[in-house]
Amino acid sequence: MRDAAGKAKLRISSVTLRFTPRTGNPVTALEDISLDVGPQEFSVIVGPSGCGKSSLLRLIAGLIQPTSGAIYLDARQVTRPGKDRGMVFQSYTLFHWLTVRQNVEFGLKIANVNSEQRARIARKFLAEVGLEGFENAYPKQLSGGMMQRVALARALANDPEILLMDEPFGALDSQTRSLMQELLLKIWESSHKTVLFITHDIDEAILLGDRVHVMTARPGRMKEMIAIDIARPRSVDVLTSAPFAALKRRIMALVHEEAVRAMG
């Protein structure tokens, strides 16, 4: 997806990633991946386990470098981590020795934002994720869903150009996961932040995404793109609709085909 001027917010151009384990032969994790994500788009990637979804997100974050090809954010090539990319992982990556507020303020402090402004920004995003009153709590005092809300607030507080989310709700129970999906939809529909979201959950992919990209078994390639033509705003009620069921059947068939190939 591109904006009216034809510009992609994120462009992945012919990216290949190879690495050599300490023991074993060289492995091609990703091969010739090309993908555009438009401004304000919520784009989702699904695929069989081991297809390289998380590796692709780490490349976009600048945590690792591609073997070949290039990645561009706002036409600037990605070569290292930067505050223009906010990352939310599946694991709870909060600093356990800092309070909730201090965790949310962490990136702002690194960026030399003054204490008064940091506090104001932290309050704003903690309110957005429903954690008012927990500013002085420590991560060990929070549930898993609450910790992920803190991680989301921390990422948003830095006002990144794109939000990269690597199965952020994968470790949560089904009820908490559903609530987090609704919360993320609410936040996205108010901010329209560009998002690239990785998940194994096809229901989640359809509920959240403007487009769903299906990857092949390793080496990961782009197999097919499916536009999610379900009107917004959305809620979990769409999970029982006929258009949702049709999209789910289509995406499940594509992923299943690749999962079988991976096992074979």
Image (tube, rainbow, N blue to C red):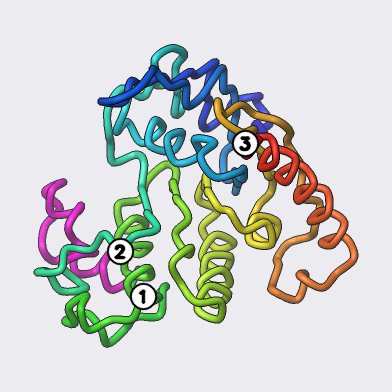
Q: In the structure shown, which secondary structural element does the residue marked by tag 1 occupy?
A: helix
Amino acid type indicated by mark 2: Tyr
- Nearest the eye: 176 or 29: 29
Is residue 43 among what the camera can see?
no
The majority secondary structure of the magenta stretch comes to helix
Q: Is residue 264 visible?
A: yes
Secondary structure, mark 3, is helix
Query: What is the C-alpha distance between the residues marked 3 and 2?
Result: 29 Å
Residue 246 position in % (x across, y down): 87, 56
Q: Secondary structure at mark 2?
A: loop
* Quadrant (top left/top right/bottom left/bottom right) for the C terminus: top right
Q: Mark 3 vs mark 1: which is more N-terminal?
A: 1
Residue 24 vertical position relative to residue 99 in the rendered view, above or below: above
Region of the chain picked out in magenta, as a range: 103-125
Instruction: Compute the Cα span from label 2 to label 1.
Output: 8 Å
Residue 40, by quadrant, is top right
Q: Which residue is mark 2?
A: 92
Discs 3/1, front? 3
Q: Quadrant of residue 249?
A: bottom right
Q: Mark 2 or mark 1: which comes first in sequence? A: 2
Numbered badge on residue 14: none
Q: Which residue is mark 3?
A: 262
| Horizontal relation, residue 107 to residue 180: left or right | left
Q: Earlier in the sequence, mark 3 or mark 2?
A: 2
Decide if residue 79 is on the left or right side of residue 263.
Answer: left
Whole-Å distance between the Cαs marked 3 and 1? 32 Å
